[in-house]
């Protein structure tokens, strides 16, 4: 799926969840995909999710906002893997 030492979810990882775990993909879309991108092609949506995930971490480092969104990734991996 993606490199084991990778810190963020890559476009390949997002594509994997989209194909194999639709409930995870739905959750990613709800959290990291802006409404403006919902009508775009799948490749653009995947890039935007990955982009927003990285931006969420770097732009809000140390703020409470991260505590809401970033634990999703670890919780989701435990739940669906």
Image (tube, rainbow, N blue to C red):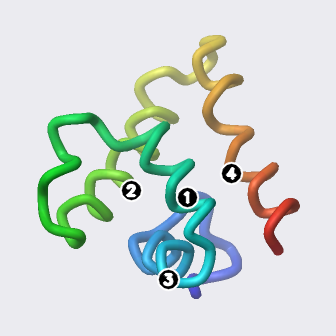
Name the residue at 41% across, 25% down: 59
Quick check: 54 left or right of 25? Answer: left
Front residue (pair 60, 31): 31
Evaluate if marks 4 and 1 touch, with contact meaning CB atoms under 8 Å apart: no
* Residue 67 point in image, percent of width and height: 70, 23
- At a point 14% along the width and 52% down the height, the residue shown is 39
User: Which of labels 2 and 3 is toward the front?
Assistant: 3
| Residue 51 sits above or below residue 23 on the image | above
Cα distance between the residues tagged 2 and 1: 8 Å
Instruction: Give the mark, 2 or 3, whose residue is nearer the N terminus.
Output: 3
Of residue 37 and residue 23, the one placed in the foreground of this image is: 23
Q: Nearer the viewer, mark 3 or mark 4?
A: 3
From the image, tell me which residue sits under label 3: 19
Q: Would you say 19 lies left or right of 76 here?
A: left
Instruction: Find disc 2 in the rendering and name its residue.
Output: 50
Q: Which residue is mark 4?
A: 73
- SS at circle 1: loop
Q: Please tell me whether mark 3 or mark 1 is closer to you in this view.
A: 3
User: Circle 1 is placed at which residue position?
Assistant: 8
Return the disc, 3 or 4, that comes first in the chain's sequence: 3
Do labels 2 and 1 touch, CB within 8 Å?
yes
Q: Position of residue 16 (x, y in %)?
A: 52, 81
Residue 55 to residue 28: above or below: above
Please tell me which residue is depicted at 46% across the width and 40% down the height of the picture.
30
Cα–Cα span, label 2 and label 3: 16 Å
Instruction: Kindly report the distance in space between the C-alpha atoms of the residues bearing marks 4 and 1.
Output: 9 Å
Label 3: which secondary element = helix
* Alpha carbons under labels 2 and 4: distance apart: 12 Å
Helix, strand or loop at label 2? It is helix
Give percent across and percent down for residue 18.
48, 73
């Amino acid at each position: 799926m993606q490199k084991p030492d990778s810190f963020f979810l890559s476009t390949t990882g997002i594509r994997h969840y989209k194909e194999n775990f639709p409930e995870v993909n739905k959750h990613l879309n709800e959290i990291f995909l802006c409404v403006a991108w919902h009508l775009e092609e799948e490749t653009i949506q995947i890039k935007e999710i990955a982009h927003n995930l990285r931006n969420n971490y770097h732009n809000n480092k140390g703020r409470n906002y991260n505590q809401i969104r970033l634990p999703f990734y670890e919780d989701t991996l435990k739940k669906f893997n």
